[in-house]
Image: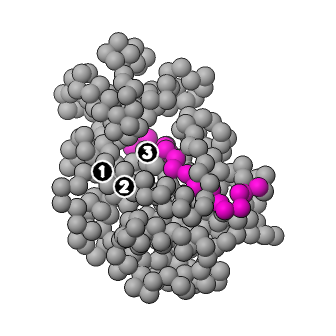
Amino acid sequence: MENKGIKICDYLDKVENKFVECFSNKGYYEEPAVLVTSGIDKTVDFIGSKISPLKHYILEKNIPQNGVFLIQNCMKLHSLKHLKDDSFQTYGSCYRGMGTLTTYDLEKVTFDTFDYLLNKKYLGIDPIDVRIRINSDDIDLMNSIKSINSDVLREYNTENVNSYRHIYGLDSQGITGRNFNIAIRKQGTDTFFDCAAIIVMETKQEKLAIDMGIGNSSLALCKFNKDNTVASSRIGDIIEINDISHMKFADSVVAVSTLLYENILSHNSKHYRKKFRQYLHALLYWKGQFGISDKEVLNYINSYIKMEYNSAKQINNEEFDNVLKRIK
């Protein structure tokens, strides 16, 4: 896992490109990503997981035969209330969720996932740097890992039972999940961090699907031995994140940039625009704490948009002035 001279953005590009290559090669259909502000999943505010654009396949019971995959920009609100304090947060506001959805073909998904992680054609992670964390009561999950490289250490029942269970916001349909987690060694340490999960989606009556998810910035956290996913995201190549304050500042830059990229000020949802103002408040708070000019903040935003989206779209000075007026 040597990473001398490798930028975070370059590694994330590799992680994402190899994901597309791997699952395209295996015949999965690529599902188009949606905007974080699309509102297609009424159980959440912004799109917070890659499963949101895929739920219709479950509810309509029409998962494509070879399965689907996608890479979805996601935004979770869990850190919003802490953006202006000094509490440590492992996970930032935004990440790219990479994942698949298939019919109940558990062994295939398990094999394909480990092929992506271990095969030198894709990520080529050393098996001794990977661990499976699993509940031994989940017999079907236990059976699915039997053929996985024996150098991948198995950890049985080492976590709280809730770590092996998943909620989808589909309670009225009785849909829940049972999972095992895949942890990766943090570079140069004996610490392993959960980066992926393979989940059986089911009701009490039947097994519906296999949902697999991997966080791009979680993989980078391990690669670069970071302690939070803000520092291991593309903003880590733009802003030096060496303490909690800079982590919160960088996270607020990411959140504001993400929503501006999606033209949040023109969105018809007052609720979404209110959330944007809360993120903007946090950004301006840290701007004041660090004595950063409007021009510097705008440069951070445009640099992030260019790097994250590979986009020529830029926020100009007049547009940013109008953004700032919304907060006054």
Residue type marked 2: Lys
**Left or right: 179 in relation to 277:** right
Q: As displayed, is residue 249 above or below residue 122?
A: above
Could you say whether the residue bearing mark 2 is in a helix, strand or loop? helix
Q: Is residue 232 visible?
A: no
The quadrant of the rendering that contains the N terminus is bottom left
Coloured how? one colour
Camera-side residue of 252 and 67 = 67
Q: Quadrant of residue 26?
A: bottom right
What residue is disc 3 on? 94
Q: Name the N-terminal-most of marks 3 and 1.
A: 1
Observer-side mark, 2 or 3, equals 2
Q: Nearer the viewer, residue 97 or 116?
A: 116
Left or right of 291? Residue 160 is right
Q: Label 1 sits on what residue type?
A: Asp
Local crowd size for mark 1, using a 10 Å CA cut-off: few (<14), some (14–19), many (≥20): few
Left or right of 203, for residue 141? left
Residue 268 in sight from this viewpoint: yes
Q: Which structural element holds mark 3?
A: strand
Label 3 to label 1: alpha-carbon separation: 18 Å
Q: Position of residue 121 (x, y in %)?
A: 40, 67
Amino acid found under the numbered disc labelled 3: Cys
**Where on the picture, by quarter, is residue 261?**
top left
Identity of the residue drawn at 29% across and 38% down = 249
Q: Position of residue 63 (x, y in %)?
A: 72, 57
Q: Which residues are magenta?
A: 62-86
Image-quadrant location for residue 237: top left
Query: In the rendered image, which residue does mark 1 sit on?
Result: 10
Q: Which mark is residue 14?
A: 2
